[in-house]
Image: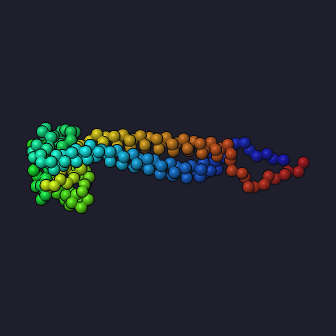
Amino acid sequence: MTTPSTTPDWPRSLRRAIAIWLPIAAATTALAVLVYAAAQQNLRLSTDDPQIALAQRTAARLDAGTPPLVAVPPDQVDLARSLDPFVLVFDATGQLLASSATLHGQVPDYPRGVFDTVRSRGEDRVTWQPENGIREGTVAVAWRGGFVVAGRSLQLTEQHVDQLGRLVVAGWLAALVLVGAAALLAALINPASDRSTLSLAPV
């Protein structure tokens, strides 16, 4: 009687390992994308929290009668260099009344279309890019005389997002490698049964 060979059938084992690995790899990829998207959104949305508080506080001061030039922070923030928060105050027509933000010595032009959303919703959150390489997370709210915009640089947040992306990619690749090794080991330890029947040789 002949006995089956103990040498691994590598082509068959590889095919079986790939069949095991593919669905797990797809699920791992989907999970990595979901983790990155959720964490990225959480970082970006939480970045707006200080601006929301600053905008609402400034609007309350304006509604209480504080002049716009007094309501904005006294220190001028150069958007090209500083990460500090800033405030812009506009009247009801969108004309600038006061600003603590400058860019190359000039007050940057904030998109007035944001105020249409504020009129209908009471608030709007916008990523503002006054020039290439400068991105500000801003929050616009209404006061009884117009609009208040508070913002701050997204530089640190975007650095955190980049670091998060690198960590997620590294974890994803490591998971794919580990799952691939486990799938190959499983295929070698428990190979697919051979459907051909063993032949009996005459004695």
Report if residue 135 is visible in the image: no
Of residue 190 and residue 125, the one placed in the foreground of this image is 125
Q: Position of residue 11 (x, y in %)?
A: 62, 49
Of residue 191 and residue 28, the one placed in the foreground of this image is 28
Report if residue 37 is visible in the image: yes
The structure residue drawn at horizontal position 12% and vertical position 46%, both measured from the top left corner, is 66
Left or right: residue 96 versus residue 3 is: left
Q: Is residue 112 above or below residue 56?
A: below
The structure residue drawn at horizontal position 21% and vertical position 41%, both measured from the top left corner, is 85
Of residue 193 and residue 112, the one placed in the foreground of this image is 112
Q: Position of residue 61 (x, y in %)?
A: 16, 46
Marker count (numbered): 0
The structure residue drawn at horizontal position 57% and vertical position 42%, both measured from the top left corner, is 181
Q: Quadrant of residue 92?
A: bottom left
Left or right: residue 193 versus residue 85 is: right
Q: Position of residue 4 (x, y in %)?
A: 76, 46
| Residue farthest front in this picture | 64
Left or right: residue 141 versus residue 71 is: right
The structure residue drawn at horizontal position 60% and vertical position 45%, both measured from the top left corner, is 183
Of residue 75 and residue 157, the one placed in the foreground of this image is 75
Q: Position of residue 188 (x, y in %)?
A: 65, 44
| Residue farthest right in this picture | 203
Q: How is the image coloured?
A: rainbow
